[in-house]
Amino acid sequence: MSLLYLDSACDGDHARISRILAASPFTLPQLRTMLLHEVHPVLIGNLRSVAGVWEGFDHDWLAAAIATQRARRWRWPDRWCWRRYARQQWAVLAPAINAKRIRAAR
C-alpha cells in the first residue's frame, strides 16, 4: 500500500498493489482499515511534501512509524486530513482485489 504514497504517478501500480493484496491473508475490511488508519496517516505527508520520496519506503521504518501512530492518542488532523485520497485509492483497489481472489479460487 505504501506505493500509493510515493511522489510519482501510481496509476500503473494499482494492478501490482491489488495483486499483492489479493494474495495476502487479510480480508477486504482488514485491508481497508490498514490503508485508512495505519498506512495513510503515516505516509500522507509524503504527498504534501515538495521533495517527497520517489523510490520507496524502508519497510522497518514504515512498520515502526505505523506502530508509533497506532500507540498515539487519536487526533483529528492525523486521522482525517486528506482521507479522501485514501478512499479514492481504495475504491480502485477493492474491486480489483476481489476480482483477483475470485479468479484465483476457480
Image: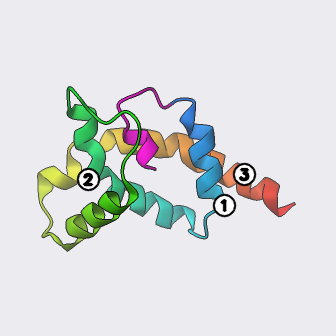
C-alpha gap between disc 2 and disc 1: 24 Å
Read off the magenta span.
1-10
Q: In what quadrant of the picture does the C terminus appear? A: bottom right
* Mark 3, secondary structure of its residue: helix
Q: Are marks 2 and 1 in contact (CB under 8 Å)?
A: no
Which residue type does callout 3 highlight?
Answer: Lys
Residue at 26% over, 53% down: 42
Above or below: residue 67 compared with residue 99? below
**Closer to the camera in the image, 34 or 91:** 34
Which residue type does callout 1 highlight?
Answer: Ala
Which residue reaches farthest right? Answer: 106
Earlier along the polypeptide chain: callout 1 or callout 3?
Answer: 1
Neighbours of disc 2 within 10 Å: few (<14), some (14-19), many (20+): many
* Mark 2, secondary structure of its residue: helix
What numbered label is drawn on residue 41? 2
Residue 16: percent from left, percent from top? 61, 42
Above or below: residue 89 compared with residue 70? above
Residue 74: percent from left, percent from top? 15, 66
Earlier along the polypeptide chain: callout 3 or callout 2?
Answer: 2
* Mark 1, secondary structure of its residue: loop
Q: Which secondary structure is most common in the magenta stretch?
A: loop
Labels 1, 3: front one: 1
The residue carrying mark 1 is: 23
Which residue type does callout 2 highlight?
Answer: Pro
Residue at 56% over, 46% down: 17
Residue 35: percent from left, percent from top? 40, 55
What numbered label is drawn on residue 100? 3
**Closer to the camera in the image, 70 or 84:** 70
